[in-house]
Image (spheres, rainbow, N blue to C red):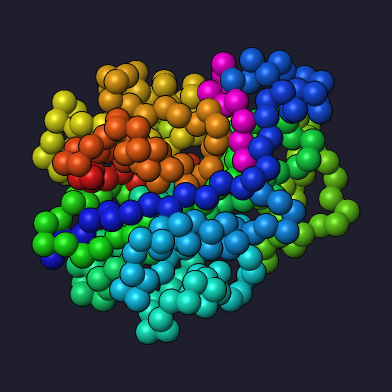
Amino acid sequence: MGAKLMAFGIYLPEFVLTNIQLSKDFGRWEPEKIESKLGIKERHISEVDETAGDMAFKAALKVLQNYDKSKIDMLLLCTQSPDYFLPTTACILQNRLGLKTDLCAYDFNLGCSGFIYGLAMAKSFINAGIATSVLLITSETYSKHIHPKDLALKTVFGDGAAATIIESSNQDQIFEFVLGTDGSGKDNLIVSNGGFRNAFDPLVQEKTTDSDNIYSDNHLFMNGPEIFNFTNIAVPKAVEQCLVKNKMSLDEVDYFIFHQANKYMIEYLRKKIGIPKEKYYVNMLLTGNTVSATIPIAIDDALKNGKIVKGNKVLLCGFGVGYSWGAVIIEV
């Protein structure tokens, strides 16, 4: 038995935060400079009362418009901004979406590698005979983790959700995975307060980064240079291992879709690995970095724009907070 990707549903919040607005609000960094460096012109930001669960619900409604929801027997939600500590947001979504109750549903907490890990779990459950139709949702509201005065992170991250259906198939179209973890890098991309290790601190002191951006331990902190160093080592290695595991060469892959971290980083990786520009997806211009949702958003966009077509072999690679990374080759 194998597994294949069936359909995608994408949701982006209505409010759009542009580089022009950020430049005006902060009085720093020209809009053109932000776009040139990051490849981002604007990003969608969730409303104050709009949660990752709400966005996941809206993305799921889109993918279920043309799919029989009674077939779904597993719901996986990847998010690092859940609606509650407990219960899991996936359980709430089962009820909101009107899915059957003889269904497995749970959340898993991962960042930019989340879609790859979700595919691995979906395929594993299908191959084990536990599920035949999996609804995998990646939904993230990183904007709610960012300090209001942190211009650097505000330029990078946008909110978004993607719902993907994975079905059992006689012909396997999700091939072999490479997955990796290195928790020694945890402090380089972290929200220190808010869990049970360190409680949320209402009197927390603001801190300033070397580049004069403001954050606090209640908010997201990112050590950009260290994250870059990590990706520079982990991603090329993961791609090489994925090709070996799938008995393919770089030339035999029709297209490459990496996590859309920022333009500078993924263009650097493309050149280092030796991927031709015409076979590589770079399009975060209107969405920014939507964390675990970037890869399914990219696949959906590439299909609609004809960059990939039925039968193409596509190498996917996600990497980020954790540190965590993963790669797989799929056939669309």
Q: Quadrant of residue 310?
A: top left
Q: Is residue 58 above or below residue 32?
A: below
- The residue depicted at 35 percent of the width and 32 percent of the height is 305
Res. 136 visible in picture: no
Residue 299 in the figure: left or right of residue 4: right
Residue 144 in picture, x, y percent from top left: 69, 50
Determine whether 23 is above or below 168 in the image.
above
Q: Nearer the viewer, residue 6 or 53?
A: 6
In this picture, residue 105 sits left or right of residue 141 = left
Instruction: Tell me the quarter of the picture where residue 30 sits.
Output: top right
User: What residue is at 82 percent from the left and 21 percent from the top?
Assistant: 27
In percent of the image, x 20 and y 45: which residue is there? 331
Question: Up-down: is 167 above or below 128?
Answer: above
Q: Residue 152's x, y, as percent?
A: 68, 30
Q: Which residues are magenta?
A: 36-45
Note whether residue 156 is visible.
yes
Quarter of the image holding residue 328?
A: top left
6 falls in the magenta region: no
Task: Single out the residue that lies furthest toward the front.
Answer: 66
How far across and down, in percent of the image, does residue 36 sit? 57, 16
